[in-house]
Image (cartoon, rainbow, N blue to C red):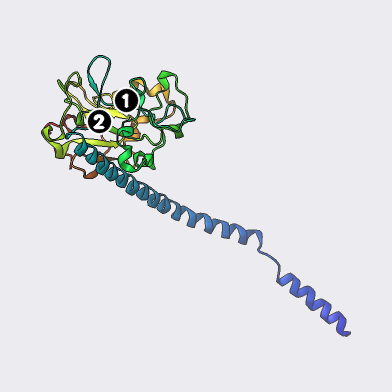
Amino acid sequence: MPRTSWNSGRCLHLQKQSGGFTLIELLVVIAIIAILAGLLLPALASAKQKGNQAVCLSNLHQVSLGTTMYAQDNADSMHYYIDPDGKPQVPNHGQWTLTPSHNALLDLQNPNQRVISYWGVAYVSYFGGARRAFRCPSAKIVDEWRETGLAYSSEFWRNSTYGINRYVALNPGPVYTADPTLPRKISEIPSPQTTVFAQDSAEQRMEGHDDSLGIFPGYQEGLIQWKVRLASLYPGVRMEFEWFRHNRQCSTLWLPGNVSTIRHSKGVDYRWYTGDLPQESPR
């Protein structure tokens, strides 16, 4: 037999043997990859969530350091201003600047601007101007004040994702009205160890049954305004879960400076906000 004929046949045989994967083999490989991905993705998501929570708790700890320095420089009091009616107020808005196109911080001495500023504006100089210290990495959406006609992007508000408890700066007065009466010194709060200073929140200033986790006298749950009145402004969003961003836990900064989490529930003892001695411990 001619040598050329034998070599041609052998080459043809080798070409057939060195072919690619069959369709069945490819499907098996894809199925294995899918199974491995299904096993790994939840673990990766969990790791990311824990990482975000660690950053969140670290941010709140930094907030504690900065606000403590502020109180030391301001006669043991947190920031407040006097409104046109002569009443003390804590800023109740989420804006750092007048609009997204502005760079300058709102002027707390300007009565036309300080009302709409985020509470962090008063303290940010103690953080070297780092607004991201007031940003939870897991925050998706917070109060954008849509009822006032504002229509800025969600990103504009994401450095305002921690809500302050108004009663760390103001005397709560009768808890049924949640009407502050006098500025308050930190040392005068009856139970600082069980008093919320700030926490994960869609509300930038918390003060009562409708915008905090506190179940105030006469009510069965907290966050009423976000579950009912303002819910229609954010269709498809459960805003109350912005208090529970980390596996249904609310990252919370307590008045003495320690941080911990509060598990999801209908609400907690309102005294955790008014600063009075609670009937139940938060930890």
Q: Which residue is mark 2?
A: 79
- Residue type beneath disc 1: Gln
**Is disc 1 surrounded by few (<14), some (14 to 19) or many (20+) residues within 10 Å?**
few
Q: Which residue is mark 1?
A: 109
- Find residue 214 and report its image quarter: top left
- Find residue 104 and report its image quarter: top left
Specify whether residue 261 is in view.
Answer: no
The picture places residue 229, in percent across and down from the top left corner, at 34, 20
Q: Secondary structure at mark 1?
A: loop
Seen at 21% across and 37% down, the residue is 73
Residue 233: which disc?
none
The picture places residue 207, in percent across and down from the top left corner, at 24, 26
Seen at 30% across and 33% down, the residue is 122
**Lateral position of residue 281 relative to residue 48, left or right:** left
Seen at 20% across and 34% down, the residue is 74
- Please report whichever mark, 2 or 1, sits nearer to the chain's N-terminal start: 2
Which of the image's four quarters has the C terminus?
top left
The picture places residue 143, in percent across and down from the top left corner, at 38, 28
**Is disc 2 surrounded by few (<14), some (14 to 19) or many (20+) residues within 10 Å?**
many
Specify whether residue 98 is in view.
Answer: yes
